[in-house]
Image (cartoon, grey):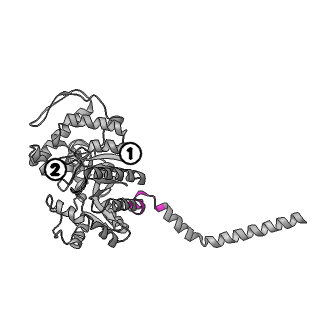
Amino acid sequence: MRFGVQIFPYHKPWIDPSVQFEDDLRLIEHLDRLGYDEVWVGEHHSTGWQNVAAPELFLAAAAQRTQTIKLGTGVSSLPYHHPFMLVDRIVQLSHMLKGRLLWGIGAGSLAQDAQTIGVEPLEQRRMTEEALEAILALLRFDGPVTRKTDWFEINDGQLHLRPYAGELDIRVASQLSPSGPRLAGKFGTGLFQFGVLGTTEDNPIAQTWGIAEESAQAHGQTVSRDRWSALHMMHIAETEEEARAQARWGLQDWVRYMVSILPLVKSDPEDFDAVVEELNDSIFVIGTPEMARERIATIVEKSGGLGSIVIGNCEIASPKHQFDSFELLAREVFPHFTGQIAPRLEGVESMARFGATGEKLAAAQEKARREYAAEKEARSA
């Protein structure tokens, strides 16, 4: 199991954006030091809260400040770009990241973004599929590509660079509908699932892989669970009370913003405790490492197995407490799913089976002292 972070980002619009960009870059450096496997950065163009318009630029900057963490677009909104121009930039980025690029693609999540540039929101899924088909044709490098739709045109298009290491790791975004896994299966790509619920019975993740495999089989493709990432939001501290207290910094601001986009909660955003309870039953864990471990285990069980869990960073706590939460996740939660804890716990159990090690060591030391005294006496004689 691998672990990552999604930086949408969500940022309070009344705080200096330059400071917020630097906070995000420092967070990625922190995640790299902690051994996180991947980080994703979103693309948005309106509403004031989500202020990264070009994730490629952001990832290029992050690459200069990190060593091993993979860097992903979370996601590039295909209907907002000419597919040839976008894939040309992404191929360049793959070289600048030297194999650390994950290319998340999707339709775009904010209707206001689409409307601003004259894209009909109800056409975005269709446009995404058309763009992805053209992009994959270009990436096959088997001759010039010509495509003409009602929104883009490519005439004898050929990319002049191959991706670093020969190919791109493309992940299709999925939320609550089956369109994401169907598209991933049709084209044999990976999957980045945003619609992952917690304790509810109708968790869509239980059906996701079946849809992807069925679509892949129908189109002569194959899909791999190893390239399936699932998003869930978490903020943890040593105690649940501490985590909740830290979340008072920004949870209600975030909820007020989100309910204008999605029916995120039924509770009154002014009722902090009710909001926390409702979120903890669905898309969030605001609590302890134990609560986070239980939720991840539930997601893995319902999914049947996936490649990575991605923790959404919603800025519900201050930057300092965000850093602390991600460090606590790395220390006390993730090792239970990466195989790092089991050998050490076995060592503890084997010690108990072995017996009182301290007494055995004391006896061995006493024996060594007696033998040394005997040797010294023999030499004196």
Instruction: Give neighbour class at mark 2: few <14, some 14-19, many 20+ (Cα, 10 Å).
Output: some
Rendering quarter of residue 257 = bottom left
State the extent of the magenta-drawn residues as a range: 329-342
- Quick check: 221 above or below 370? above
Rendering quarter of residue 188 = top left
Q: Which residue is mark 2?
A: 46
- Quick check: 135 above or below 377? above
Q: Which residue is mark 1?
A: 65
Query: Who comes first in sequence, dot 2 or dot 1?
Result: 2
Q: Quadrant of the C terminus?
A: bottom right
Instruction: Give neighbour class at mark 1: few <14, some 14-19, many 20+ (Cα, 10 Å).
Output: few
Q: Secondary structure at mark 1?
A: loop
The x, y position of residue 62, in whole percent, is 34, 45
User: Is 179 in the magenta?
Assistant: no
Amino acid at the residue labelled 2: Ser
Which residue is situated farthest in the right direction here?
381
Q: Nearer the viewer, residue 220 or 175?
A: 175
